[in-house]
Image: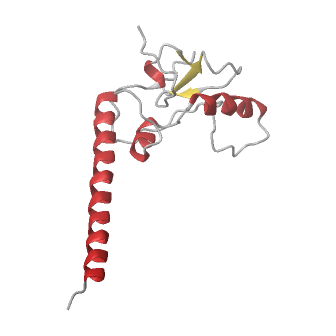
Amino acid sequence: MVNRRSFLQKSFKTSVVAFSAVAWGSLATAANKYSKVAGLSKKKKKAATCPHLIDLSMKNKGNETNNKAVAFAKNLGYVENVTKAVKTGKAHPKAGALCGNCMFFIPSAAGNKTCGKCKIIAVPGAQVSYHAWCKSWVKKA
């Protein structure tokens, strides 16, 4: 015999699981739509070297340039990989918004299309990823 308490507990657990599945599915769908609009492919490309790319993980704490750049980046809500940030809900950019198509992005002189400088992050030598994003993003004219 099922009493009222066990019935309500099972109903609650079922509704929580269903809600979680729907919420997770909508996040994944949003990330997939974003990836398609931004022109990001799922194929892993060989990463080009960007010697002064901002390292938010702070693995090299002795690097003064990185420390200053990270301070700027955190204030701007900078995320290194916008697709991952959308999937986890850490960023909510407009469709197709990447550092690479922002008016503040300056591609590296070496013709490396994976990183460049940002006019807002005023730290000499600091570079941002083409596939990054921040709250100050403005579409290139």
Q: Position of residue 42 (x, y in %)?
A: 34, 41
Residue 53 in sight: no
Q: Please give the name of the residue rendered at 32% of the width and 34% of the height, measured from the top-left corner.
A: 34
**For residue 77, side relative to residue 71 (left or right):** left
Q: Outermost residue toward the top?
A: 141
- The residue under the point 64% across, 31% down is 51
**Quadrant in the picture for the N terminus:** bottom left
Labels in figure, total: 0
> Residue 113 at x, y = what percent?
48, 23
* Image quarter of residue 98: top left
Pick out the residue farthest to the left: 1
Could you tell me which residue is drawn at 31 percent across and 76 percent down?
Answer: 9
Q: Measured along the vertical axis of the image, is residue 141 above or below residue 17?
A: above
Q: Quadrant of residue 140?
A: top left
Between 79 and 42, the residue placed more toward the observer is 79
Relative to 14, does residue 63 appear above or below in the rendering?
above
**Residue most toward the bottom?**
1
* Residue 16 placement (x, y as % from top left): 32, 64
Q: Residue at x 35, y 41 (%)?
A: 43
User: Quadrant where the C terminus lies?
Assistant: top left
Q: Horizontally, is 64 left or right of 4 in the view?
A: right
Q: Position of residue 56 (x, y in %)?
A: 63, 40
* Image quadrant assignment for residue 62: top right
